[in-house]
Amino acid sequence: MVTFLSGGTGTPKLLAGAREVFDPADLTVIANTGDDIELGGLLICPDLDTVLFERGDVLDRERWWGIDGDSTTTHDELRDLSERAGFEGGPRYLADERQTDGPRLARWRRFSGVGEFMTIGDRDRAVHLLRTSLLSEGHSLTETTNRLADAFSLDVSLLPMSDDPVATMIHTPGGVMHFQEFWVAHGGEPVVEDVEFRGAERADPTAKVLDALAEPVIIGPSNPVTSIGPLLALDGVPAALAETTVVAVSPFVGDDLFSGPAAKLMRATDTEASTAGMAESYPFADAFVVDERDPTELGRPTVTTDIGIDDREDSMRVVEAVADALALVEAA
């Protein structure tokens, strides 16, 4: 049994080749839910859905989000209708007092659907509608995710990190905004002063998550701050990781980042934006997989390979290096 911690696109890209190295029946994926938002009354779980669509073989692999070939008729009409009604596009938070009303999972990240600022495909929207409806019926996010996994015929177990709300909030000179506003609406441009995982102190990992963390854990080349950080902010998770075998894949080559806002966010949280900073973020890691061009000395067992992932063959190569790193730890 092996457990992947997933957020953003790094770990899903790694998962693309995992079934060739590990038995899918032995794989569990725990996804970050700090990026989730409620938009127009629907709960959107980007990191859960990227794994759901990738494992369900419908993911748009050009963008690494959404469903391949999806139409955007509803999104386009909603944007046009909002404009005709006199509203400008862009994120529109519900009023402060509404942020803690309604479904608990939507706390602190509730956006109006007016001028919808995320492009939601029509098939994609159906997933969010079913998820929100099941939650409204009283199902937990874990139960709801399991139903969606069945619908997409997943060959791995997929778990949200918690059934409680945790919202990744970015502190900027202009105020506090949710990560989706920072990254999607503003392209990661605002200056970052700090990153907050709001609600993490009152959120718990589920029993299924803790069980999965008792198995060997793989952290893919994800953003250590906003993709993995929310999970590490949950009580009991760092301790669980300290008790099991953990292999982490660097998203850097030295201090060069492959993609995304990780470097900016790491610097804002007083962490070096580099492979060394990644290792510092994961003090519980037993071994690492780093790029063969990376000169960083980590002081822990390290396997090197070309960690660039552009296709399934690349993914298989990196997963094989992960398996080698696991074997190194077990042999020590």
Image (spheres, rainbow, N blue to C red):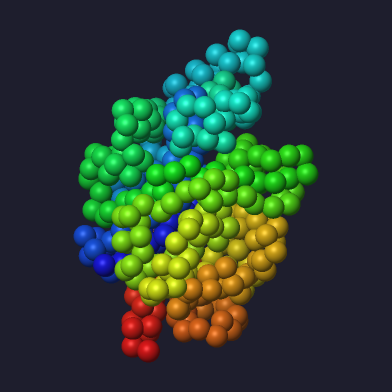
Residue 30 in the image, given as x and y percentages of width and height:
38, 55
For residue 49, side relative to residue 268 (left or right): left
- Relative depth, front residue between 129 and 102: 102
Residue at 46% across, 34% down = 104
Q: Is residue 328 above or below residue 263?
A: below
Quarter where residue 317 is shown: bottom left
Residue most toward the front?
202
Residue at 33% across, 83% down = 330
- Relative depth, front residue between 104 and 130: 104
Quarter where residue 247 is shown: bottom left
How many numbered markers are drawn? 0
Q: Is residue 217 above or below residue 175?
A: below
Residue 323 in the image, given as x and y percentages of width and height:
34, 75
Q: Is residue 232 above or below residue 80?
A: below
Pick the quarter of the image with the N terminus: bottom left
The answer to whether residue 66 is visible is yes
- Relative depth, front residue between 191 and 234: 234
Residue 206 in the image, given as x and y percentages of width and height:
36, 52
